[in-house]
Image (cartoon, grey):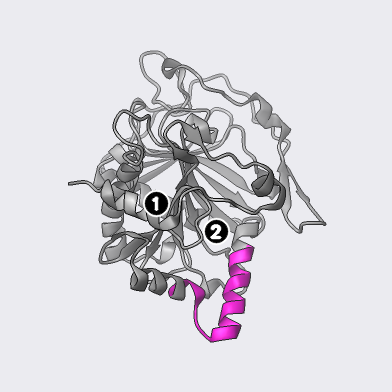
Amino acid sequence: MKKTVTRLADGRELVYYDSRDDAVRGAVDQRPLGPTSTTSEVRHDVLLGDSVAIASHRQGRTYHPPADECPLCPSRDGRLSEIPADDYDVVVFENRFPSLAGDTGRCEVVCFTSDHDTSFKDLTEEQAGTVLEVWTDRTAELAELPQVEHVFPFENRGAEIGVTLGHPHGQIYAYPFATPRANLMLRSLREHREKTGRNLFDDIVERERAEGTRVVLEGAHWIAFVPYAAHWPYEVHLYPKRRVPDLRGLDDEARTEFPQIYLELLRRFDRIFGEGEPPTPYVAAWHQAPFRAAGRADFALHLELFTIRRTSGKLKFLAGSESGMSVFINDVPPEAAAERLREVASE
């Protein structure tokens, strides 16, 4: 993989990741952009103990542009976009409307392909493998920033999720703190270790393999299952069988197998609700260990994939119990969700 670092007209960093070593990336951003101006601020909630990013400049971000004005497509035919080149494999650049910036962290956009009319599930295994290498490289790069404590690569797909740009892309948030979800997992890890002497993540994976009813897909190096207490109607957790704290720890065998397993999961997600249904909206979220957290070595890298669609034409809204008290109520039994995801396997 060849990596080429350049700058956009307003000074933001852009990085090309090419599968070919002879790729030349000399295109210059010709847009008349002034320096970016952000108002990101992180405020600590003393009652709940978590943090909130205040980012008023995001009110003016690009919102559902027509396909011929997509800012994530290559610059071609006289139209200039966020990517100066006329084609690309994978591109990462600093978000023009970041939730976190400067001392409060960093937000990046990851464009998975130059093809506007596709989705992650349509990538080849080679392309998906390149994206995995990009996530890993960005984790390593962002780990070197002194203000960054936790790196979160993720993809939101579908307008129902809140996506404002239709081009296949994801984001990476580099937080200046360990996120509440990570802290809860670390606390559970610690309590389980104190009580049993064992690793909680290892026990979870072993339980799912032993019971089998919620296992969706298993390879030599990865296992995917619907969790016992799934929050979402269709939710799958994907773990490497060799526990590592973040993407940097994956070995070559796990990296090679990942595209096969993950692409199959995404294709199954689009078949859950039957033929003729629109693409399934989803969130795909990588959970990695915070860099300086106590108990980091016990953390298990994993990906959580879920949809807010509970049945054909109906969404799972976070209403009173979920939004007000963080108590989820799931309409689909996890065992039934796993069975459905096994039924729609590729032939």
Task: Write the residue at 60% across / 77% down.
Answer: 190
Q: How many residues crowd around disc 1 within 10 Å: few (fewer than 14), some, or many (20 or more)?
A: many
Q: Is residue 47 left or right of residue 114?
A: right
Which amino acid type is shown beneath numbered disc 1? Ala
Using the image, determine if residue 198 lies above or below residue 56.
below
Task: Write the residue at 61% across / 26% down.
Answer: 61
Q: Is residue 1 visible?
A: no
Q: Is residue 45 left or right of residue 28?
A: right
**Which region of the structure is painted magenta?**
183-202
Main SS class of the magenta portion in the image: helix
Using the image, determine if residue 89 lies above or below residue 195.
above
Is residue 197 located in the magenta-colored stretch of the structure? yes
> What's the mark number on residue 337?
1
Q: Is residue 12 left or right of residue 25?
A: right
Task: Write the residue at 70% across / 30% down.
Answer: 57
Examine the image and state in which quarter residue 218 appears: bottom left
Q: Which residue is mark 2?
A: 143
Q: Secondary structure at mark 2?
A: helix
How far apart marks 1 and 2 lie (CA) works out to 36 Å
Task: Report how many numbered discs are placed on residues in the image.
Answer: 2
Task: Write the residue at 43% across / 51% down.
Answer: 135
Q: Is residue 71 visible?
A: yes
Name of the residue lying farthest toward the right: 46
Residue 18 locus on image (x, y percent): 32, 42
